[in-house]
Image (spheres, grey):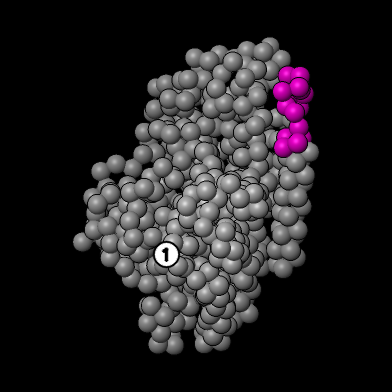
Amino acid sequence: MKNVSRSKKLVKLMTNWQVIEEIPVSSIFPWPYAWLGWVRRIKQYLGTSFTEGRTASVNGAIWHIANTNEALALAELGIKKIQDQKFVNMVEKETYKVMHEAKEFWINEIANAELSKKTNAELLEIYNKSNEHIEALYGVGLIPSTLDMSHNAFSEKLSRYVAQRGKSLGLTAQESGEAFSALTTVEKKTLQQLQEEDFFKLLIAIEKNSEWKKSLVSGKWSDVKPLKNMIEAHAEKYGWLSRGYEGPILWTPEYFADLLSSEAKQGVNAEKKLVEMGDAKKKSLAKQREYSDKLEIDAAHAQLFDVARRFTVVKNDRKDIVLEFYWRLDKLMREIGKRLQVSEKQAKYILPNEMKDALLRGEVDANELRNRQKLSYFTVTSNDFKIFTGKEAQTFISSLQVTNVETHELRGHCACPGKAIGVVKIINSPSEMTKMKSGDVLVSHATEPNLVPAMKLAAAIVTDQGGITSHAAIVSRELGIPCLIGTKIATKVFKDGDKVEVDAASGVIRKL
């Protein structure tokens, strides 16, 4: 595990690198092979790719870093490609194929396997196969993400078209924002929406059984076996969503039981809630048809809006599989850490090209892994992995950090229109959700399913990253909450306690 010095090359390349995604994950596994999907696999479909990818581990977060010129070139090429219906169909078909293969693998090789009885060589084989599936998931499956990576090229193209059409027809900025939101709303329910529906169906069943309801509100639900089984089944089916990219799982049976009890005590009408959820989706789709007719969208742009909606579904479904896969892989990495006498998290700092020697020797340099945890970044090319720590890592990471930003206003893209005034709360991980209060403005690098409880309390949502197919865009449209995406540095400009105004339709957040 030796660091390779390339400082001269670093100086030359620094100005072209940009953080394209920042997520609250404190380990580098499984990101090396995720990057290989972009560096190696995506070339099969787009004809070009990134020549190199980088990921930094900084203060308990992971920064994915890309060459901005290459990111824009990929976006522009992808936007041209998706104008061919056959290409779009291929992306959908291939993405669901690799998703199915990944799920079959983890069920057979990890979830139902007794890993403690495997030899180190057998664990290595499972680890390598896992990485192959990760690479595949981040190949064709990431084509929708390339359209908006770094520059939000696809979102900007469509929002600009809607704004121009709206202006020519005399629509206000608010109406144009509503049109854009409606035209990018998808019909298929997300896993989070399905969870909420099943939650209220469970509440209906409890309301109809006086014994169950009494046991629930008294905190003795686990004493009633049928009720206990139903709540545990709900947690088993959906609880892993709260894990995000890195645990722990917060949506336990106890968590859902407390929520059900709270709703029952407040006399929430679960049947009415289900109807309202269905009506909201119908209204959104009706708005979509209305604005499509009103704006008289030409055939070429109608095709692009159709792709945006289809890719939103593909991207969301793929992410669900990825998140569940990472949860399943925890079991494997715990066993590997145990064999190497390091923690699970330290095991996740071993590069793929180092894992063979580590497992076959049965040992690893724990001090080096601790240094990587403190501060490091790795590079990925089509055939090589390298990692840097210490001063070399600090030099590169410092060149990417945004400091001393003196502005009171930022612009982004409208995901869901509306205006709101509230107090900023920076929320990037579930551990930060406790500071969120109803009416606050949630500001995040990029939201994930485990942040939905906080998102529901928000008067508005603002993100650094993401385009029209992002999680924040999807959820904000579902909830009808004003949302501004792709501001790039909102989490750096604003801080907890700042009072801000968000005008999503105009694409602006400003400090008051």
Determine which residue is flagged by label 1: 266
Q: Residue at x 73, y 19 (%)?
A: 120
Q: Position of residue 178 (x, y in %)?
A: 45, 76
Q: Where is 5 relative to 52, above or below?
A: above
Q: Which residue lies furthest to the left in this view?
A: 512
Front in this rendered view, residue 384 or 471: 471
Residue type of the residue flagged with mark 1: Gln
The answer to which image quadrant residue 380 occupies is: top right
Q: Where is residue 196 in the image (x, y as percent from the top left)?
A: 55, 61
**Magenta segment, prevailing SS (helix, strand or loop):** helix
From the image, which quarter does the N terminus lie in? top right
Q: Position of residue 506 (x, y in %)?
A: 35, 71
Front in this rendered view, residue 99 or 6: 99
Neighbourhood count class around disc 1 (C-alpha, 10 Å): few under 14, some 14–19, many 20 upward? few
Front in this rendered view, residue 193 or 21: 193
Residue range in magenta is 109-125
Q: Which residue is drawn at 65% across and 23% down?
A: 336
